Amino acid sequence: MNIQVKKPPLTIRLCGPRGFCAGVDRAIQIVVLALKAYGAPVYVRHEIVHNRYVVEGLEAKGAIFVEELDEIPVEHREQPVVFSAHGVPKSVPEDAQARNLFYLDATCPLVSKVHKQAMRHQRLGRHVVLIGHAGHPEVIGTMGQLPPGTVSLIETVEDADGYEPADPDNLGYVTQTTLSVDDTAGVIARLTERFPNLSAPAADSICYATTNRQEAVKEAAPGCDLFIVVGAPNSSNSKRLVEVALRAGARRSMLVQRAAELDWNEIGDIRTLGLSAGASAPEVIVDEIIAAFKARFDAEIELAVTAEETENFLVNRELRGVPLTVEDMAWVNGVRA
Ligand code: SF4
């Protein structure tokens, strides 16, 4: 006799927007197009985006990831090196030129905009306050746009409380693009309270993709037994989504890189699951997670859509018009949201 075991019901609240942003999409396209235009190997300084699935997929196509330019062998100096979406200090393109390397910059245009805003503050004689996380490549890149001693990093409200600038009336701030919108507002409020002449950047530094993903999580999280964010532990925007979900009312929240990582004992008996993905997480992994839950639960999907995104950033001039094969297009589309 074939006894069918009834699966427990589950509602999956699927956030939109989720996953790839225009900056990540552009950076991945740059590496794929460079491989097509110049052949393998194409060197990439730092993980092009913080996601192992993407990095390993590009490695399989002929990309070689390095942390520093001196890791590129002399015999490969004709091959391009791509700078990651997070941006690089000014010293990196200078070093590439000194080594006679051909580089393609995949810095997200919204990160470049923050660089310009920081340089503008400095040009106007202001000491720059950068709100962000120490050690993150974007923060290293932004600090590296300015001469040493002209920028101070503030991470928390406590840092803002203890900050003692040399000239409190002559400060201008910018922020990392992937911070928590609410936490950053708290830090800015505290700094403004202490330094009323603090100058804001011309436009918000936290990018549209970070803001939109956090808004969708806030909409979906209240009442969720568990909230899963697809993303890597070194992805700043993914980690922020985990925090936002908890604050917005999810009972538990976790970062997951692949479905194989899911610990079903830990997940336990749940009725409502929230699901989103950081800006560097491919949609194929979201599909994989949904399939894993559908195998164990009688799951229905409920969409939590708070914005439509139409942003699209052009690739570098040298790569426009490079044709991709059907296979390359299928891979790029497969990782897209
Ligand atoms: S998260 Fe924002 S700043 Fe970062 S790559 Fe995406 S669009 Fe650009």
Image (cartoon, grey):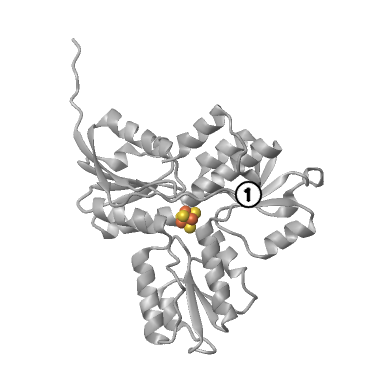
Residue at mark 1: 317
Q: Relative to 204, is 67 on the left or the right?
A: right
* Residue 306 placement (x, y as % from top left): 28, 52
* Residue 24 placement (x, y as % from top left): 50, 49
Q: Work out whether 213 lies above or below 320.
A: below
Q: Relative to 11, is 332 on the left or the right?
A: right
Q: Nearer the viewer, residue 164 or 167?
A: 167
In the picture, which quadrant includes the N terminus? top left
The kind of residue tagged 1 is: Arg
Q: Relative to 45, is 307 on the left or the right?
A: left
Q: Work out whether 328 lies above or below 70.
A: above
Q: Residue at x 58, y 79 (%)?
A: 122
Q: Residue at x 30, y 34 (%)?
A: 293
* Residue 308 placement (x, y as % from top left): 33, 49
* Residue 117 placement (x, y as % from top left): 52, 71
- Dot 1 alpha-carbon crowd within 10 angstroms: few under 14, some 14 to 19, many 20 or more: few
Instruction: Specify the farthest residue to the right.
Output: 75
Element on which disc 1 rests: helix
Q: Work out whether 161 lies above or below 240.
A: below
Q: Residue at x 43, y 47 (%)?
A: 231
Q: Residue at x 66, y 65 (%)?
A: 90
